[in-house]
Image: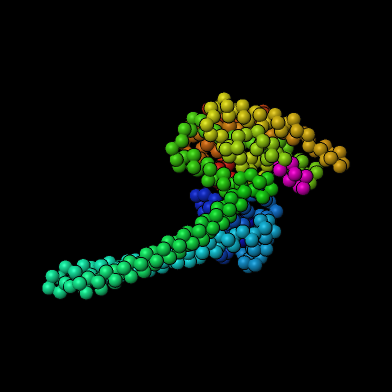
Amino acid sequence: MKTATASKKVQLPDIAAQVTYAMRTMGVAPIPRNYELFYEAYIGSNPKLTKDLAALGNKATQEELDAIGQQYFNTNRPHALDGAHSKIVSELEGLLGVLKQEQNSLESYNKLLGDTVSRISDKNSASVEILRNAIGVLSEATGDTMAQGEKAVESVVKKSVEMEKVRQELDEYKRIANTDSLTRLSNRRAFDEKLAAIYNRQTNRSVTALVIGDIDHFKKINDTFGHPVGDKILATVANIIRANVRRDVFVARTGGEEFAIVIEGNSDVEAMQIAERIRKALAATPFKNSKTGVDYGPVTMSLGICMASEADEPNELYSKSDIALYCAKNDGRNQVRMFEDGMKKESNKTWMLYRR
């Protein structure tokens, strides 16, 4: 994405820093829905969005940004996150108020118990009347305390239900925010998180593979038939990939015509077999317009694989998978290649900074 500051090169460590920097230099409020817009613009998953956002220049109003968000994301949803903090704070304050009231009630009750015990223990003043009065006071206080306790429990339950609703709203927002609107697969943001997680937790990397697939000659398809046809092909490819892997396999559209698959629990041979299954299924699928009979095919895909054990960190894993993909493309396309030592490619593409 180009901004007025594009001529001033700033080296930033990752895409999150780039997005934050761009928003700051353009004077854009650092709220979640704005961050989402700039994030999508930087990863390049929707070139038209990138172009529209760049056209606003350095004087974008919040109304203009929200209009773009509404157009591309149907964003009633980001406002849920913007207001989530105040909702959570409000519910927590209410819950703390209930607990504080219960604490005060119990402190008063404990004080009453202490005073009563002292009076009964005083042999000089002990009498039947004093005992009767003490029993009466304790009975009434115990009843009130129990009733207060029941109300406190009800209030805590109610507050917990409300907080659970807020949590569910946030979970739903995160799901939508991490979903590519065109293919319904995970998007680049979710992929970044998934790839980082491989190296942030204890996992058997010898049975974890990253597969990067790229549709062959996709630019030619767009140029020949137009972007609406290209979008339909992308959605169909996404469905084919999803249909040929287990439900627990992570699949994402990472930008343009590129897809990423993280396969866990399979050897390199099995990962190769899965990638081959996807490639063959796609190559065997006819891409025709049922009404006009126009044939958009053949549509094929090249795929590169690297096992997580072959890399020390996410950037290296992505780079090696991309090198294998490049070799598949360079060797004639419509094939799968596993990364091997000695494979080379002139590229500075990285897992978080790459923009198509």
Q: Looking at the image, is 150 positioned above or below residue 286? A: below
Name the quarter where the C terminus is drawn. top right
Depth check, front residue: 156 or 190: 156
Q: Position of residue 327 (x, y in %)?
A: 62, 30
Location of residue 255 by image quarter: top right
Furthest residue to the top? 269
Magenta stretch? Answer: 227-235
Q: Is residue 139 above or below residue 323?
A: below
Q: Is residue 132 magenta?
A: no
The residue shown at (45%, 62%) is 154
Picture coordinates of residue 226, whole percent (x, y): 79, 46
Let me know if residue 64 appears in the view.
yes
Query: What residue lies at 50% left-to-right and 49% top-to-bottom?
Result: 13
Query: How many numbered discs?
Result: 0
Identify the residue shown where x is 54% and y is 50%. 15
| Vertical arrangement, residue 241 with respect to residue 48, above or below | above
Q: Position of residue 127 (x, y in %)?
A: 17, 73
Residue 216 placement, left or right of 79: right
Query: Looking at the image, which residue sits at the far right?
Result: 292
- Tell me the quadrant of the picture where the N terminus can be found: bottom right
At 52% from the left edge and 54% from the top edge, which residue is drawn? 17
Q: Position of residue 348 (x, y in %)?
A: 56, 41
Q: Is residue 104 visible?
A: no
Magenta stretch mostly in which secondary structure? helix
Q: Is residue 41 left or right of residue 230?
A: left
